[in-house]
Amino acid sequence: MAHQQQSSAAPIRAPRPTYASYTEYIDTNNSQVHPTTKIRQVRWNDEMDGFMITALVNQVLAGHKRSDNGFTSFQVSKAIESVTKGCGVVVSDKNVRARLKTLKKEYAEVNQLLSISGFGWESETRRITADSLAWDDLVKGKPELGKWRTKLCRRYDDMEAIFGNDTATGDRAVSGFDNFSPIQVDESLNEVDTPNEENDPSPNTSRKRNA
């Protein structure tokens, strides 16, 4: 009786799905689906913010202004493309707009602080600077701003380009952008923030530029 010869070839394995072709295989550390809305939530990190903001800054530099209602669908599509290609995470129009609401609120808070006497901006450390007495007085009336005592605003310059007004100078001078007063933004179900903001517990010893 002849013995059947076994093949030495390796078994054929199905190719692993990629982000480009299988959006349902998004990294579970970066996204989830809300149980009631069934809308995919995205857990943003600094890298994703970087790709998204850079894409929007490029749109500003190219002369593409926002619409009266905010960023245009074309601008958001460029941000989506940048995040997907750069980070391998698929995000939606709603995800990007929700994240931009949060960043817009942070930008407005930083500007509010810079308008207060005694507060300044240190470009090297990306921090708000003030002495201890100024911070103590601030949190008595505006406790929600106390987080900026240690929190960094790493992309303030870029946020100024996409959220700022026509007083910007230099390479990022773009007209037609409105002022943003401090606003309250409800947390969107389409966005989940990770603790990607960097907090520095060290005292403020850097140079201070008064607003």
Image: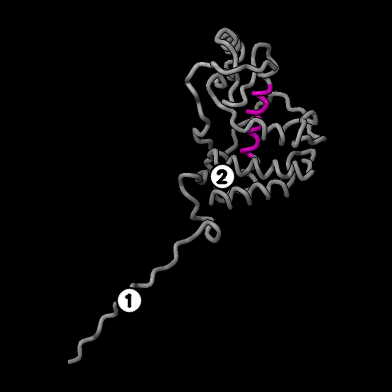
Say above or below: 195 vs 209.
below
Residue 125 in the image, given as x and y percentages of width and height: 57, 25
Give the labeled residue for mark 1. Answer: 9
Look at the image and say whether residue 99 sits in the magenta stretch. yes
Q: Label 1 neighbourhood size at 10 Å, few (<14), some (14-19), many (20+)? A: few
**What residue appears at the point 58 percent right and 23 percent down from the top-left corner?**
127
Indicate the quadrant containing the C terminus: top left, top right, bottom left or bottom right.
top right
Q: Amino acid at mark 2?
A: Thr
Q: Is residue 201 left or right of residue 63?
A: left
Label for residue 130?
none
Q: Secondary structure at mark 2?
A: loop
* Quadrant in the rendering for residue 15: bottom left
Q: Is residue 195 left or right of residue 129?
A: left
Residue 93 in the image, given as x and y percentages of width and height: 65, 47
| CA separation in Å, label 1 and label 2 | 48 Å
**What residue appears at the point 55 percent right and 41 percent down from the top-left corner?**
47
- What span is colored magenta in the figure? 98-111
Residue at the extreme right: 176
Q: Nearer the viewer, mark 1 or mark 2?
A: 1
Q: Amino acid at mark 1?
A: Ala
Give the labeled residue for mark 2. Answer: 37
Look at the image and say whether residue 184 sits in the magenta stretch. no
Q: Is residue 3 left or right of residue 12?
A: left
71 or 199: which is nearer to us? Answer: 199
**What residue appears at the point 72 percent right and 24 percent down from the top-left corner?**
181
172 or 5: which is nearer to us? Answer: 172
* Quadrant in the rendering for residue 55: top right
Residue 21 in the image, given as x and y percentages of width and height: 54, 61
